[in-house]
Structures are given as structure tokens and as C-alpha cells.
Amino acid sequence: MTNTFLFRFAVYLAVALCAWACGHQVTDSKPQGSFYTPRYANGFCIDTSGGTKTLIVLNPFQNSKDLAYRYALSDTPPKRVICMSTTHVAFLRFIGQAERIVGVSGAGHLYDSLMQVAYNAGAISDVGYDKTLNIEKILALQPDLIFAYGIAGEFSATAAKLEELGLKVMYIGEYTEHHPLGKAEWAVAFAALFGSEQQAIEKFTQVATSYEALKALVVAAAVPKTKTLLNSPWSDAWFVPGALGNVAQLLNDAGGESVIKLRSQRDSYPISIEQAYSSAQAADVWINVGLAKTLSELRAMHKLVEDIPAFRRGNVYNSTARVSPQGGSDFFESGTVNPHLILKDIIKILHPSLLPNDTLTYYRLLGND
């Protein structure tokens, strides 16, 4: 495909997404699903009003407001799909539809061993990402559907190009959910495309029941909140999660309390390293330390790190127990559909006596090497 040909499609930046299946509309309303209204998720519902089953994706971008994408569901499910995020791979694996994947964005970020085998065998292709997205390869794969995500709608221009070429794109907004179970519940949205909503609902219900049982265990034990330091230095700042986001929810449900007072927002935000260091003196445990796999790597991030009490005691944990040789993190992949296992890990870290016979799944204690 020539540069001139690609440039021609850049003029369609404001083109609305095309129809797929029986129709696809973009509206600014917030309909209520009459077939399935999620228990935890805020970003989708399945509607049957008007005699047509429709998957409605609400506000799939950060800070979007009153935006709804309507995808009319067909009796013919997509046979060939492309995933622009590893979380999409996890959802399809969860609902038993992973064999339909023919392309992924950034194969090196995959943890799923079966996907790695398929990629190495040439059964799935890497279509690139962002500015390196290979549109020619996408066209050659002849996908029935592309699962996409966009930060503040940044993918919209690319989606318009793809759909002008006759390809069908669906936005997935699970990353905008406030609750970890809300993210996992998107499995039902994926399943709706394949007519297997009921099986997905049953499987998700098992996950939710396990999560709520673990949360209830902590409440019943009436254990004191474990003072916890979250995240690590990055450049000249320390990013901490918002109080309304997934991390804060997991920490609270596991019986933990951030030593840094979290702002009432969903997204992470920066504070000074000095401010974080001051708060860190009260922490019993330190978790979620970026890419660090050892205490030595963590120490190299900033000179103040080794003076943090939790570091000196070696009480530092990170979600790096399941990482592929290429760097793919299963915490961010299958962890999306297994929030109960992440919660179990954090409870085990903060209150080990509550789960004496359990082992960590996604987290590991950092050693010196």
C-alpha cells in the first residue's frame, strides 16, 4: 500500500464508525440494557428493546461522557478476530473463543503460552501498534472483527481508516472500569458476540462469588488495616493510584490502607518523590513496584529507596511472578478475568494468617537477585 494511498484515508478523521453485523450506531445517550445489566461494570449492557439484541458500549474512553456505541448482534459470530490488547486475548480465552484470534498487537507482550506457540507457528500475526500499525497485514488477515481500545479516543482516526477499508472495529472499554470485577464482567460483552452470554455469566458469577467470599473473610476477621506503600519512583515523580480505581479497591478489600492519602479520582497522579518517601516511613508492606524484579533493580530507581523501612526489611512484593521471557505480564493479561486470584494474593501478602495454606499466583516477594 503506497504512502499516497494511506494519506488519502487521513482525511476521514471525523468519519463515524461504519455499521457491522446488522448495524452500528454512535449515540450520546445512556440506554439501559433489558437483556443484561451488569452487576459491577459501568461500560456496557445488552439491550433487546425494539426486537433486536444490541451490545451497547458506554463511554469506552477515559473522560468521555454520554457516548454510546451500539453494536447490533448477529446470529453469525465473527470467525476471525484481531486483538489490539492482551486483555482481549484473556477475555477470549476465558469464554473459550481464543482459537478465533488471527492477529494481535504486540506479540512480544503476550504471556498466554498457547498464543505464543500459535504465533511462532505462523498461525497468528503481529499487526503492530500505534504508528507502526501494519494496515496491509490487517487487510491480508481478512478479520471479521477488530477489538480495539482508545485512550481518550486516540484510536478513532485509525478506526475510521480501517472501517473505510471495509473492516469492522469494536471498542472495548474494560480498562475504564472502577472495580476489578467490573473489568472481568466484560467477558459477558465478548460472549454476546458469539451467542454464549449465559455460559459467560455463569463463569463470571463464579469469579465474583470467590472475590466476595475473600472480601468477606477479611471483614469477618476484623484485622487491623495493614499500612501499605503503593508503586515506585518514575523519573522525578511518584505516581499513585486514585482512590476510585481498581488498585485502591483491591487494597481496601484485602484489608490494606495506603500510607499516601489517595485523591478521590480514578486515574493515577504524580506526587513528589520526597512526599512519597516521607509517607513511606509508616508502611509495613510495599507492593506494585513497577518493572522491578529484584531489590537491586528497585534500589537503582532512586537513592532514597534503600532508606524506606519496608525495603530494609525485605517486605516488598511485585506482580512479576508470571512474566514471559519476552516481558509479557500475565498479571495484566489473565489477571483481568481473575481478580479473585489477585485479591487472594494481596490478602496473603497483607494478612498471611488468613490464608495459611495458599500460595501466591501473580505476586512474588522480591529478593536481591
Image (cartoon, grey):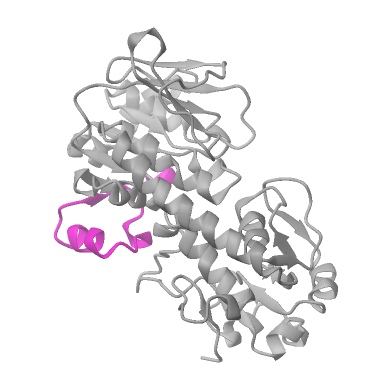
Q: Which residues are magenta?
A: 106-134
Q: Is residue 288 visible?
A: yes
Classify 304 as above or below 39. Answer: below
Number of numbered callouts drawn: 0
Q: Looking at this view, is 186 or 119 the one in front?
A: 186
Above or below for 50 versus 315: above
Query: Residue 350 versus residue 111: which sits nearer the camera?
Result: 350
Magenta stretch containing residue 224, yes or no?
Answer: no
On the image, the x and y values in percent for residue 134 come to 31, 43
Is 187 on the left-hand or right-hand side of 124?
A: right
* Residue 112 belongs to magenta span: yes
Judged from this view, the residue extending furthest toward the top is: 50
Residue that extends furthest to the front in the rendered view of this protein: 220
Give the image location of residue 232, x and y in percent: 67, 70
The residue located at (49%, 46%) in the rendering is: 183
Q: Quadrant of residue 115?
A: bottom left
Q: Vertically, is 152 above or below 89?
A: above
Q: Nearer the viewer, residue 23 or 205?
A: 205
**Residue located 52% across and 33% down the image:** 43
Residue at position x 76%, y 85% in the image: 309
The image position of residue 341, as x and y in percent, is 46, 64
Q: Quadrant of the N terminus?
A: top left
Q: Is residue 303 above or below residue 242?
A: below
Which residue is pictured at 44% across the width and 72% down the height?
361
The answer to which of 361 and 38 lies nearer the viewer is 38
